[in-house]
Image (tube, grey):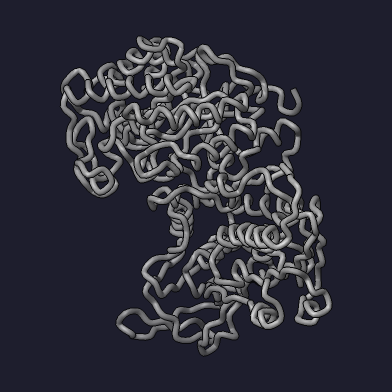
C-alpha cells in the first residue's frame, strides 16, 4: 500500500469503491465555453488531477438553472440535454485513471448579480443583499417545485453522461444553504420557518434523484457552521445530516462559512492546517455514511492522521491540487519533498472573484494543461542556454528547459537560489513561501541544470561562452525616492533579514503596499513598537489578494498600527518624518527609526547589452517589469516553451519524453 496506509486505503461509498481517501474538492475555475459547455480545457484540467492519483473528483459547481442560478462566466451548465456530450467526455477522462467522478449541482441563489444573469437574483425570502447590493426576489412555491425538478433533471443528465454520482451544493451561502439557514429563510409555508421545513427542499431533491437512479451516489456539501449571527449552527447541521442519510445521501462533505462570514469559507494563510476538522468530527457522531473534511490541509502526514484517528473518512484537497495535481501519487510513493507546495496566496480565488479563469501562482500549467502537454518532444541536439539570475523566474525557466533536453547553466551573483523569496518568506504566516523556496532548490539539485553561484555574469561571459540562447532574469532592487534625508532610512530587506535592528519605540514605514504592511506585521511580532505607515494612495496593501489583505489589516489594527493614507512624505529628519495630507499642511511624526518600503525597480542592463550581440535573448520576471512571483514563474515557463518551439522549427529533430514539464 506504500506510505500513509489509512489515507490510501479503499472505501466503499454507496455503489462504488474508492481506491483511496483523497478527494479533489469542487473549485469553480471558469474554463467552460461561453455556453457553459465542457471543452478540452476543462477535460485536460480534470484529467491531470485524475492521473495524479485522486480517488474521487467532485467536478466544480455546475448550474442547474440557467440563467437565474449562474454565478459567473465560464461556469459549467447542466440544465439541458445539450450538456451531455461534453460531460460524457469529461467523465470518461476522469474514470480511465481509476478515479471516480461526481459533479456538483449548484444554484447561486442570491449570491449572484443581474449583471451576470440578466434577471433578478432569487432567494427563499427577501433577506440580505446580493454581492452587487441587490435585494433578491422571493421564490414562489411553484418556482421552488420547478427548482427541485431542475436538480433532479441535472442528476439524470449526470447519470446519462456516466458520472458516478452528484453532489448537492448546500453551503457557502448559495441557494440550498439559504433555505437551510434560519437567518435567510423566514418563509411561512412548508419550505421555511422550522428546521423540518427549511431542509424540505434538500430532502425532496434527494428523494427525486433516488427515485430515478437508486445507484447514483449522492454527496451533500453541507455548511456545518455558517459563522454568521443567526445562521446555521453545528447542532442544527448534525440533525440535517442525520435526515439526509435517512433520505438516501451517501456522503456528507463538511464545510463552513458564507460570503458574509468573512474569512471562514476561503481561509487566508494565517489559519492553521486542519482548523475545521472538528466540524466533520461533529457530523460523524450523527451519521454512519462517510464524512469528508478539508480546507488548508496540505501535509500528507496530517491527512493520514485525520483518517487514522477516525476524525473523518475522506480528506478533500482544493488549492493543493491546483499547485500540484500529482500530490496523491507523490504522497503514496513517499516523495513528499517533490510535492509543489501551495503558498496560500489565494491568487486563484482572487481571479474567480474578478470573473476570470483560475490559474495558480506556483504552477504555470494549471488551466493551461491543453497547451503544456504532459508528453513533450525533447530536443535531440543539446542547445546551450545561459540563464542569468536564480530567482523564481530563472529557476522555473531552467527546470523547464532541462526537462526539454537543453544544456542549461544558471548563474547567480549571490550564494544561493531564490532571489527575493527569502525576504518574502520572513513576515508572519509566510511559511509556505519558505516551503516553496526549498522545493525550488530541491528541484534544481535533482535536475541536470549546472548551477554557478557567487558569479556576476557580465558581457564578457557572453562573449566567451557564446550560448545559443540567453535569458536575463536579474530581478529588481529597492527603489529609493529622492527625498531629503532618505539616507537615514533603513532598508526593507535589511530589516527582514535581521542585518539591522530596529531600535526605538516609534517607527515610521514609508510605503503602504503589501511590502510595507508586511514589514509592520513582522515588527509587531518581534518588538514593542508604535508603528505608523504612510501611504500616498487611498488604500493600504492594494496589491494584495483580498482575503489575505483583510487578515493582514486586522492584525495591524489589533496591533495599534497607525495607518495614514493619502499622505505624502516630504522629508526625513533626525527626529522623524515630515508628511502632508490633502490640505498640504506639513507636520512631523516623531520616529527613532524610519523604514523605506517604496517599491522596486528592474535590473536589466545586461539585456540591453546582449541584444546588440545576439538575437535569441529574453528578459523575464522583475527584470522585465516589477510584479510578483506569479508573473515571474509563468514567464519563466512560457519563455522556455518559446525557445523550445524555435528550436524544433530550426533543428527539426527531437525525441519523445513523457515526464512532462
Residue at x-position 69% and y-position 54%: 400
Q: Position of residue 645 (x, y in %)?
A: 65, 58
Residue placed at 16% from the left, 27% from the top? Answer: 140
Residue 188 lies, with reference to residue 418, above or below; the image says above
Tally of numbered tags? 0
Q: Nearer the viewer, residue 615 or 366?
A: 615
Q: Is residue 318 visible?
A: yes
- Image height of 451 relative to 569, above or below: above
Q: Where on the picture, by quarter, is residue 568?
A: bottom left
Rendered location of residue 471, percent (x, y):
69, 69
In the image, residue 554 lies at what x, y percent?
44, 54
Most foreground residue, 230 or 134: 134
Query: At which x and y percent is residue 109?
Result: 28, 35
Q: Nearer the viewer, residue 226 or 447?
A: 447
Where on the picture, by quarter, is residue 108?
top left
Q: Is residue 24 above or below residue 441?
A: above
Amino acid at each position: 500500500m506504500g506510505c500513509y496506509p489509512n489515507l490510501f486505503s479503499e472505501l466503499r461509498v454507496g455503489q462504488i469503491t474508492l481506491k483511496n481517501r483523497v478527494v479533489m474538492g469542487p473549485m469553480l475555475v471558469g474554463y467552460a465555453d461561453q455556453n457553459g459547455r465542457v471543452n478540452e480545457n476543462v477535460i485536460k484540467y480534470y484529467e491531470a488531477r485524475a492521473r495524479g492519483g485522486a480517488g474521487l473528483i467532485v467536478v466544480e459547481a455546475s448550474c442547474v438553472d440557467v440563467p437565474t442560478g449562474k454565478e459567473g462566466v465560464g461556469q459549467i451548465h447542466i440544465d439541458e440535454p445539450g450538456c451531455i456530450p461534453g460531460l460524457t467526455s469529461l467523465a470518461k477522462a476522469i474514470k480511465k485513471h481509476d478515479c471516480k467522478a461526481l459533479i456538483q449541482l449548484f444554484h447561486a441563489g442570491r449570491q449572484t448579480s443581474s449583471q451576470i444573469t440578466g434577471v433578478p437574483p432569487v432567494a427563499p425570502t427577501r433577506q440580505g443583499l446580493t454581492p452587487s447590493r441587490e435585494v433578491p426576489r422571493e421564490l414562489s412555491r411553484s418556482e421552488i417545485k420547478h427548482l427541485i425538478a431542475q436538480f433532479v433533471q441535472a442528476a439524470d443528465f449526470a447519470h446519462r453522461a456516466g458520472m458516478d454520482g452528484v453532489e448537492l451544493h448546500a453551503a457557502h451561502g448559495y441557494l440550498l444553504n439559504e433555505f437551510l439557514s434560519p437567518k435567510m429563510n423566514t418563509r411561512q409555508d412548508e419550505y421555511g420557518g422550522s428546521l423540518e421545513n427549511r431542509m424540505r427542499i434538500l430532502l425532496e431533491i434527494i428523494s427525486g434523484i433516488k427515485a430515478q437512479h437508486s445507484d447514483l451516489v449522492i454527496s451533500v456539501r453541507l455548511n456545518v457552521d455558517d459563522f454568521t449571527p443567526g445562521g446555521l449552527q453545528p447542532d442544527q447541521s448534525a440533525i440535517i445530516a442525520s435526515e439526509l442519510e435517512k433520505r438516501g445521501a451517501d456522503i456528507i462533505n463538511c464545510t463552513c462559512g458564507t460570503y458574509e462570514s468573512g474569512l471562514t469559507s476561503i481561509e487566508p494563510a494565517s489559519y492553521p492546517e486542519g482548523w475545521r476538522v472538528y466540524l466533520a468530527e461533529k457530523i460523524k457522531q450523527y451519521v454512519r455514511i462517510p464524512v469528508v473534511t478539508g480546507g488548508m490541509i496540505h501535509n500528507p502526514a496530517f491527512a493520514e492522521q485525520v483518517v487514522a484517528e477516525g476524525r473523518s473518512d475522506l480528506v478533500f484537497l482544493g488549492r493543493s491540487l491546483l499547485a500540484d495535481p500529482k500530490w496523491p501519487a507523490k504522497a503514496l510513493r513517499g516523495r513528499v519533498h517533490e510535492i509543489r507546495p501551495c503558498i496560500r496566496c489565494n491568487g486563484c480565488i482572487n481571479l474567480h472573484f474578478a470573473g476570470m479563469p483560475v490559474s495558480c501562482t506556483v504552477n504555470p500549467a494549471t488551466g493551461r494543461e491543453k497547451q503544456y502537454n504532459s508528453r513533450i518532444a525533447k530536443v535531440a541536439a543539446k542547445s546551450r542556454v545561459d540563464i542569468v539570475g536564480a530567482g523564481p523566474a530563472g529557476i522555473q525557466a531552467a527546470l523547464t528547459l532541462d526537462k526539454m533536453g537543453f544544456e542549461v547553466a544558471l548563474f547567480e551573483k549571490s550564494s544561493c537560489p531564490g532571489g527575493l523569496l527569502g525576504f518574502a518568506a520572513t513576515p508572519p504566516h509566510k511559511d509556505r513561501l519558505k516551503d516553496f523556496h526549498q522545493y525550488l532548490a530541491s528541484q534544481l539539485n535533482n535536475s541536470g541544470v549546472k548551477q554557478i553561484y557567487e558569479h556576476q555574469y557580465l558581457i564578457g561571459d557572453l562573449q566567451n561562452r557564446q550560448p545559443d540562447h540567453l535569458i536575463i532574469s536579474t530581478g529588481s532592487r529597492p527603489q529609493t525616492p529622492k527625498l531629503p534625508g532618505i539616507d537615514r532610512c533603513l532598508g526593507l530587506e535589511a530589516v527582514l533579514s535581521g542585518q539591522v535592528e530596529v531600535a526605538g519605540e516609534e517607527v515610521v514605514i514609508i510605503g503602504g503596499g503589501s511590502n510595507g504592511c508586511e514589514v509592520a506585521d513582522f515588527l509587531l511580532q518581534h518588538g514593542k513598537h508604535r508603528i505608523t505607515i504612510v501611504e500616498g494612495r487611498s488604500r493600504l496593501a492594494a496589491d494584495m489578494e483580498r482575503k489575505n489583505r483583510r487578515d493582514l489589516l486586522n492584525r495591524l489594527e489589533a496591533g495599534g498600527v497607525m495607518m495614514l493614507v493619502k499622505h505624502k512624505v516630504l522629508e526625513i529628519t533626525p527626529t522623524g518624518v515630515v508628511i502632508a495630507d490633502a490640505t498640504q499642511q506639513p507636520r512631523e511624526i516623531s520616529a527613532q527609526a524610519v523604514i523605506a518600503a517604496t517599491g522596486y525597480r528592474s535590473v536589466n542592463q545586461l539585456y540591453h547589452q546582449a541584444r546588440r550581440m545576439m538575437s535569441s535573448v529574453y528578459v523575464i520576471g522583475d527584470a522585465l517589469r516589477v510584479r510578483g512571483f506569479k508573473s515571474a514563474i509563468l514567464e519563466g515557463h512560457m519563455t522556455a516553451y518559446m525557445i523550445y518551439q524555435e528550436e524544433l522549427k530550426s533543428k527539426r529533430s527531437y525525441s519523445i519524453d513523457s515526464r512532462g514539464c
